[in-house]
Amino acid sequence: MNAALQFDFNSKSPISPWLEMGAYEALWLEQGASFKTIAEKFLSRPSSLPSDFVSNGTALEMASVAHDKIRKHSSLPYGVRIHGAGEYPNKIRVAKHPIELLYYQGLWALSEQPSIAVVGTRQPSNEGIANTRKVVQALIGNKIIPVSGLARGIDSIVHETAIEQRFPTIAVIGTPISMSYPKEHRELQRRIAREHLLISQVPVVSYENMPITKTRTFFPERNVTMSALTDATIIIEAGETSGTLTQARAALEQGRTLLILDSCFQRPDITWPRKFEQLGAIRVSRIEDIFANVSSTYKD
């Protein structure tokens, strides 16, 4: 692909997705790179693109490497959304360290529809499983897209329930689109990427050489983006140290509605539900409580 012209945010010059994808990958190869350090680069130069920090030659080389890795994993089409270019979801700019580039597979238009994140533990109780299905079915009944993170437990139940109901779902994953995680969700991920929408902010090229202490951080970071991308977050079930609580904190910081099922408050072994309620989260005792607290979001 051809290199992009230098882009001026006040002009109509085109942006090259190929060049910017490669530049984004190159930024992640820098020593100590993180979402925080990369966000700080762009904060210091607000009108910049990834290619403004990387030579064209390096960007083009990294784009080819990333493309080959993605193609080795899947032949499905993929694309990127770049801050400053059309169809980038500006609503994610409320995140503490907003992402400059997102990878996606599937139907990007779904990201522009009403959506609510439904998240929770990887080891749900029977009650949690049943509640997840009830909540997702209720969202579908109100034409709201259920969003989750494709992890084991609550996340996969969210996606599977939507698919069973022949309704769209969105997965925001904590790994690159060049791999499937967990491995048992390979077919589920592929189906979402083909028929629904799969989104990742995780770099492709540098990921495989990162220590697990680094790659582990991508999961809570994607929760922050998932919160910003959606209109509200519903927590089904979560332990005291669950990564789900990262999304709870992010939702409140971003001004998103945070809903917690009443069953969480009934557990004597956790204290986080009441702490978040004091900070502004809403306790949900009935399905109707969800729509009573998010209905204003969807008014014209």
Image (cartoon, grey):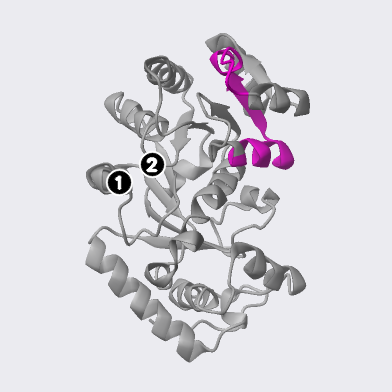
Residue 244 in picture, x, y percent from top left: 54, 37
| Foreground pick, 245 / 82 | 245
Q: Is residue 300 visible?
A: no
Mark 2 vs 1: CB contact within 8 A = yes
Q: Is residue 250 magenta?
A: yes
Residue 9 lies in quadrant: bottom right
Task: From this view, report whether residue 47 is shown above or below residue 268.
Answer: below
What range of the chain is rendered magenta?
246-270
Which quadrant does the C terminus fall into? top right
Q: Is residue 124 left or right of residue 260?
A: left
The three-letter code of the residue at mark 1 reads Gln
Q: Quadrant of residue 195?
A: top left
Pick the residue in front: 4 or 170: 170
The image shows a total of numbered marks equal to 2
Find residue 193 and report its horizontal and vertical position in percent: 32, 49
Q: Which mark is residue 20?
A: none
Amino acid beneath label 2: Leu
Q: Residues within 10 Å of mark 1 (few under 14, many from 20)?
A: many
Q: Name the residue at 31% across, 58% down.
A: 179
Mark 2–mark 1 Cα distance, whole angstroms, equals: 7 Å
The percent position of residue 251, horizontal first and vertical second, equals 66, 37
Disc 2: CA contacts within 10 A as few (<14), some (14-19) or many (>=20): many
**Helix, strand or loop status at disc 2:** loop
* Residue 88 in view in this figure: yes
Q: What secondary structure is found at the residue carrying circle 1?
A: helix
Query: In the image, which disc is placed on residue 189?
Result: 1
Q: Mark 2 highlights which residue? A: 150
Query: Does residue 218 lie above or below 257 as drawn?
Result: below
User: Which badge, 2 or 1, comes first in the chain's sequence?
Assistant: 2
Residue found at x 43% / y 19%: 128
Residue 6's place in the image compared with 229, above or below, is below
